Amino acid sequence: MSTRAAGPTPFRFFPVRVVRIVDVTPHLRRVTFTGEELEDFADPGWDQRIKLVLPAVDGGYAHLPTGPHWYGAWRALPAEQRPPIRTYTTRAVRLGPVGAARAGKADLAPIAPAVSRTGTAGTQVDVDMVVHTPLGPAAHWLGAARPGTSAVLLGPSRAWLSAQPDGVLAGGVDFVPPSVTGRFLIGGDETAAPAIARILEDLPTTARGIAVVELPTAADAAYLPTHPGIEVRVLARAEHPHGERLVAGVKRAAAELIPEGQPQEVEEIDVDRELLWEVPRTARGGAALKRADVYAWLAGEAGAVCALRRHLVSERGLDRRAVAFMGYWRRGRAEGS
């Protein structure tokens, strides 16, 4: 299946196949993809969101629309012919010879300054996925996937980015702190762990702050990299309700990092009916900040993130233009439902 468009677009489909599957921890599995068209797969870093397109029950990818208006056509497909789509984070990109040669050009250098190279192999993309129950479409696919298994990624285009002014991204990056940031408050559960790991790797060594991550067990703690200026606090959930330890841990970190401010009115969000996704460039209150004493990035189960949104903005008075809140998922609901 070729998914090349007539001209570059910010995001495009990439037909891929699995080349390697590794259990990094008991609950986080790394799937490595390769494919001829991945030479155009961009890697802006940070919390770059991408989509994994899973085969439909009827026809696999035969009915997947890939044109400029693909989303409407995809939604209009009968359920059995509609390939399920799930959201993940680009964990790493290793360029093959063609992609490395292109990345070496001056006009592409700003796109992915920290990508590694695979030598004689083709370009590879790592995606870390949570191993969990109950089993939805993604968990079923992950359990059955083997080297050679076909899939489709929807991700940013290197060709499109190379034609844009410096600083322009294709979308899907929400870790956008002010240019001058004093300290960072980062928090999330296992679904946010790949993004947090990438953020910790991409932050300069001069960055300071606290990262609080709730993971299923203590054995999963090894997943997160260290950072010389960010204290990483991993909280094993064990028998606690999902999000309970995350909320408590972020509140403790906030008390250490955020001076008491003027509480702000914050609209309540019904996370069972609405998407909780508020980042500085879309938050109310005016233009994005150029300087902040503290920048917060919080992602994971929507109920826990909603509680933290209320605490940081309504109770502690953190400027909402200096915080990103993302409800990645809602307990008891599949993505997109």
Image (cartoon, helix red, strand yellow):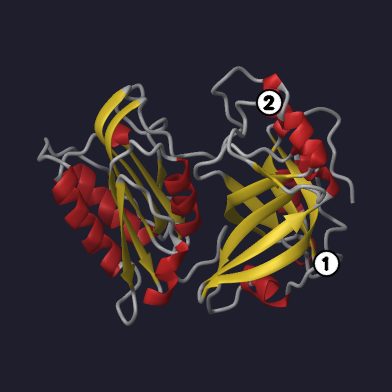
Q: As drawn, is 57 to the left or to the right of 167?
A: right
Q: As drawn, is 337 to the left or to the right of 191?
A: right
Camera-side mark, 2 or 1: 2
Secondary structure type for disc 2: helix
Between marks 2 and 1, how big is the CA–CA gap? 30 Å
Q: Looking at the rendering, in which quadrant would you find the C terminus?
A: bottom right
Residue at the image point whose x is 77% and y is 63% from the top: 19
Residue 56's spot in the image, x, y percent? 78, 65
> Which residue in the structure is indicated by mark 1?
148
Residue at the image point whose x is 24% and y is 61% from the top: 249
Figure quadrant of residue 8: top right
**Looking at this view, is 140 or 314 the one in front?**
140
Dot 1 amino acid type = Gly
Residue 285's spot in the image, x, y percent? 29, 27
Figure quadrant of residue 226: bottom left
Is residue 29 in view from this perspective? yes
Dot 2 amino acid type = Leu
Residue at the image point whose x is 80% and y is 67% from the top: 149
Is residue 217 in view from this perspective? no
Residue at the image point whose x is 73% and y is 57% from the top: 33
Whether residue 88 is situated above or below residue 114 in the rendered picture: below
> Which residue in the structure is indicated by mark 2?
108
